[in-house]
Amino acid sequence: MTNACLAAKERWARKMSGLAKPAARATDRLPPGQHEVHEFPVLDLGVQPRIPLDKWELAIRGLVANPVTLNWAQFMALPQFKDVSDVHCVTTWSLFDVAWEGVAFFTLAELVKRKPEAAYVLFKSYDGYSTNSPLAVCLDDDVLIAHTWKGEPLPVEHGGPARVIIPKRYAWKGAKWVREIVFLEHDQPGHWEQRGYSNTADPWTEDRFAPGGAIPAGWRVTGEA
């Protein structure tokens, strides 16, 4: 584990223990090219799958020593993690101070015992969506699989029962309706990454699209919830 990942794990451990002090919010927290909104816009591919909790599963596999498929009860029995972070969408809106609860990515990585050669993660969803990130990005103190938003079960339109949250990347990297997490040695681009979006998705450098890319057709905005 790199020094950066170790530092992130220490920050996460302090949050889990309740010893972390609330983070001071910077005055320049709005990334370039973004505008602040006060409601949570709904974005999807035109499908909002409804997965009953007794049918929901999360498979975690790939370069891991202990692949697992968790049902809802097993997922909820894992250590729970609360955090507040901002959401930045590639379509230029940002929503501040979003309260999440779920299972930290660190918890899942330790559960399956990732192998040393694992360097990337591919997330797959119940609607057929997929997206990729470097493992080092996922091993940050604010990354989680969220099932609760603002103290209530995560609504279907925002990815419920459970979705991925990666606050330091544009929101398309946080797969809604997640059903599978695959640890990989080599990068494997996901849905939008194959269709012109940037592979790295850093809001602070406006890393929205691949060189020569354009806004892909099909991304649906259905209003605000």
Image (tube, grey):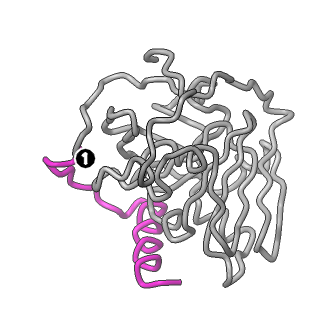
Extreme-left residue of the structure: 27
* Residue 63 quadrant: bottom right
Residue at image point 70% right, 67% down = 183
Rendering coords of residue 66 (x, y %): 82, 72
| Residue 157 on the magenta segment | no
**202 relative position to 173: left or right:** left
* Residue 116 quadrant: bottom right
Rendering coords of residue 89 (x, y %): 40, 38
Nearest the camera: 181 or 73?
Answer: 181
**155 relative position to 77: left or right:** left
Mark 1: which amino acid?
Pro
- The region drawn magenta spans 1-30
Q: How many labels does the image show?
A: 1
Above or below for 192 versus 142 = above
Mark 1 lies on a secondary structure that is loop
**30 relative position to 186: left or right:** left
Above or below for 216 versus 207 = above
Residue at image point 85% right, 33% down = 54
Nearest the camera: 43 or 199?
Answer: 199
Rendering coords of residue 188 (x, y %): 66, 61
Rendering coords of residue 196 (x, y %): 51, 46
Residue at image point 78% right, 68% down = 62
Above or below for 26 versus 172 = below
Q: Name the residue under label 1.
A: 31
10 Å crowding of disc 1: few (<14), some (14-19), many (20+): some
| Residue 16 on the magenta segment | yes
